[in-house]
Image (spheres, rainbow, N blue to C red):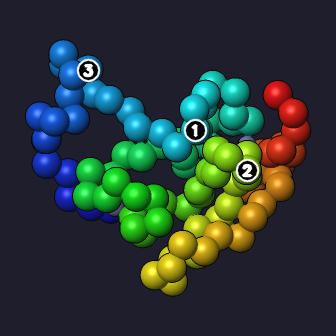
């Protein structure tokens, strides 16, 4: 875990902005996946740069991937949620 300092830029009218990779997290299969796609780290804007990040979502391809933290932007594409087993690419 990273040290977290309060950064005023992350607050908007007193409400913390939740950044997420997914445009509609409410449609994700489970809250664990929702949490995995949220960007809670204040040290990194890029999920590939943050060692705490597990999952990347590619909106154009509608694909989910496990981030391979080897310094490059590699993922292992997954078709089922690693937590609840739901199919990830089913048409909404
Ligand atoms: Zn980080
Ligand atoms: Zn799930």
Q: Secondary structure at mark 3?
A: strand
The mark closer to the camera, 2 or 3, is 2
Query: Which element type, helix, strand or loop, lies under badge 2?
Result: loop
Q: Which mark is residue 22?
A: 1
The answer to whether any part of residue 83 appears in the image is no
Nearer the N terminus, badge 3 or badge 1?
Answer: 3
Q: Nearer the viewer, mark 2 or mark 1?
A: 2
Is 35 displayed left or right of 10 in the figure? Answer: right
Locate residue 24, reporting x and y percent: 61, 28
Above or below for 18 versus 55: above
Left or right of 78: which side holds 31? left
Q: Residue at x 69, y 34 (%)?
A: 28
Q: CA distance from mark 3 to mark 1?
A: 20 Å
Which quadrant holds residue 56?
A: bottom right
Residue closest to the eye, 52 or 58: 58
Where does label 2 land, which residue?
61
Instruction: Name the quadrant where ligand 1 sits.
Output: bottom left
Res 15 label: 3
Q: Image point 54% across, 72% down: which residue?
A: 73
Describe the element under mark 1 as helix, strand or loop: loop
Tell me how far mark 2 sits from mark 1, CA to CA. 12 Å
Q: Is residue 19 above or below residue 82?
A: above
Q: Residue at x 60, y 74 (%)?
A: 74
């Amino acid at each position: 875990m990273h040290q977290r300092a309060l950064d005023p830029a992350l607050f908007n009218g007193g409400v913390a902005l939740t950044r997420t990779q997914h445009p509609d997290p409410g449609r994700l299969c489970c809250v664990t996946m929702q949490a995995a796609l949220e960007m809670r780290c204040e040290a990194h804007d890029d999920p590939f740069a943050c060692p705490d990040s597990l999952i990347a979502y590619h909106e154009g391809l509608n694909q989910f991937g496990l981030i391979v933290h080897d310094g490059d932007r590699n993922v292992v594409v997954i078709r089922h949620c690693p937590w609840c087993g739901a199919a990830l690419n089913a048409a909404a």
